[in-house]
Image: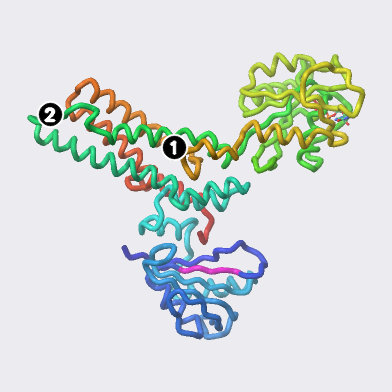
Amino acid sequence: MTHDTIAACSTAAGRSAIAILRMSGAEAYNIAQQMFGKTLRARQALVGDIYGAEGQTLDNGLVLYFPAPNSYTGENCVEFHCHGSPVVAGAVLRTMFALGARQALAGEFTRRAFLNGKLDLIQSEAVIDLIDAETEQAAVNAAAQLNGSISREVNSVYEDLTVLLAHFHAFVDYPDEDIGDVSDYPQIYRAIATLGKLLDTYNRGRIIRDGVRVALVGAPNVGKSSLLNALAGSDRAIVTNIPGTTRDTIEVSLVLNGLRVTLVDTAGLRDSADTIETMGVERSIIEIENCDLTLAVLDASNPNSDGETAEFIKKARRSLTVLNKCDLQVLNEAEGLRVSAKTGDGLTALSKTISEMFNISEAGNSAFASALSNERQYAAILRATDAIKTAEAALASGVTPDAALSDVEYALTALGEVNGRTVRSDITDTIFSRFCVGK
Ligand SMILES: Nc1nc2c(ncn2[C@@H]2O[C@H](COP(=O)(O)OP(=O)(O)OP(=O)(O)O)[C@@H](O)[C@H]2O)c(=O)[nH]1
Ligand SMILES: [Mg+2]
């Protein structure tokens, strides 16, 4: 496949120590050679003058040449490591354009790597997850996916099903043959087992990548906003001694012991004549139903302040009772984690309890080096599994091969969407548009 030559700045905009400009395509070598004072050598780092289109020296920097196919994209690639001035980087990039390259689109280098078989689609999506990772765990998980840990499992099932499909086609072509029993097809069982184990890792993977949503819920004035501020380490939400201060949900993103948490402050739960406050309370109720964990906040100093919190909490998927204001005399007998937003007492224990509830570091019971964390991949693997199970049931009940064949074919197509072997281009367009320019 011949492609035009693309170029982009691969480092973040603005002043920095180094700016890296990257080119890929048939003309990358020629253009780079015209811009550089030394003869480029494959995979050797050379320091030399970098010239503009008129022959003026723009910078002195490092240039690396990776001939096809041993490069990131699989095409001829050249990297210029310049001084990190936006002016220098801009001038070097414009020279590349003047000599025949064009601006790369978002994710176009990785898209070419995918099209040239350097990365499959799972690995390509891992690249963006690695760049976007907000915790070390998320980065480690994405790195393992980039390394092929999920691809290997999906591909082994894909190969298995391809063999199976060939068998079934043979039966369709020679209908006199007996299709045999489901036990004649170990591929079916292997596929169900492998894909099932992969699907089991998804909940953990999703939490590693996207984190959890934790809502602070309770009666007015118990200190929900104060707790949010104390955990976030900044005065994000307004705090006053007037009940009904918070009227809208307020979100803060933080990392608690490696767990990414979106902490949501909500309006205090009570019947109010105020339209705005009532709308806020409706939002609190929606939040209780939607979040992964609800912290039911009570005022330790006031046993009569709990209101209907316990009633509302019944709708939560998971909840944890937190007794705030423990710096004051504790008069509330309710069971719960004792904290003080004012002094910070108990907040470390609270963070620890939250992160342990989601247990993302428990890799021990997982069969794989990485967890499935991508919703698109999860949905497609689920569809593939369902189809294989249908084929299994059909074979067990002694159907004609063409019935099982269509289910296996469907499963194969679904897995092809995961590893990218049979994926539609509008899906890949969406995937690569999430990337930054230069990647
Ligand atoms: N002594 C003490 N006072 C606290 C503590 N946490 C909050 N307060 C006080 O309690 C009052 C209410 O705090 P907020 O954080 O606004 O309470 P809230 O639950 O968000 O209230 P609404 O938004 O009205 O529902 C303020 O005067 C805070 O200073 C605490 O741990 N100890
Ligand atoms: Mg508040």
Crowd rating for badge 1 (residues with CA inside 10 Å; few <14, some 14–19, many 20+):
many
**Residue drawn at 28 percent across, 41 percent down:** 160
The x, y position of residue 53, in whole percent, is 51, 81
Say which amino acid is labelled 2: Asp
Q: Is residue 352 above or below residue 307?
A: below
Q: Secondary structure at mark 1?
A: helix
The residue that disc 1 covers is 198
Q: Earlier in the sequence, mark 2 or mark 1?
A: 2
Q: Secondary structure at mark 2?
A: loop
The residue that disc 2 covers is 178
Near-viewer residue (62 or 150)? 150
Task: Report if residue 4 is visible in the image.
Answer: no
In the picture, measured across the screen, residue 320 lies left or right of residue 359, that is right
Main SS class of the magenta portion in the image:
strand
Q: Which residues fall within the magenta stretch?
A: 19-23
Badge 1 residue CB within 8 Å of ligand 2 = no
Near-viewer residue (72 or 103)? 72
Quarter of the render that holds ligand 2 = top right
Near-viewer residue (4 or 144)? 144
**Residue drawn at 66 percent across, 64 percent down:** 14
| Residue with the most extreme left position | 176
Q: Is residue 20 magenta?
A: yes
Say which amino acid is labelled 1: Leu
Per the model, the C-alpha gap separating discs 2 and 1 is 33 Å
Displayed quadrant of residue 273 = top right
The x, y position of residue 260, in whole percent, is 64, 41
**Residue drawn at 44 percent across, 66 percent down:** 6
Q: Is residue 199 magenta?
A: no
Label count reads 2
Crowd rating for badge 2 (residues with CA inside 10 Å; few <14, some 14–19, many 20+):
few
**Residue drawn at 54 percent across, 51 percent down:** 130
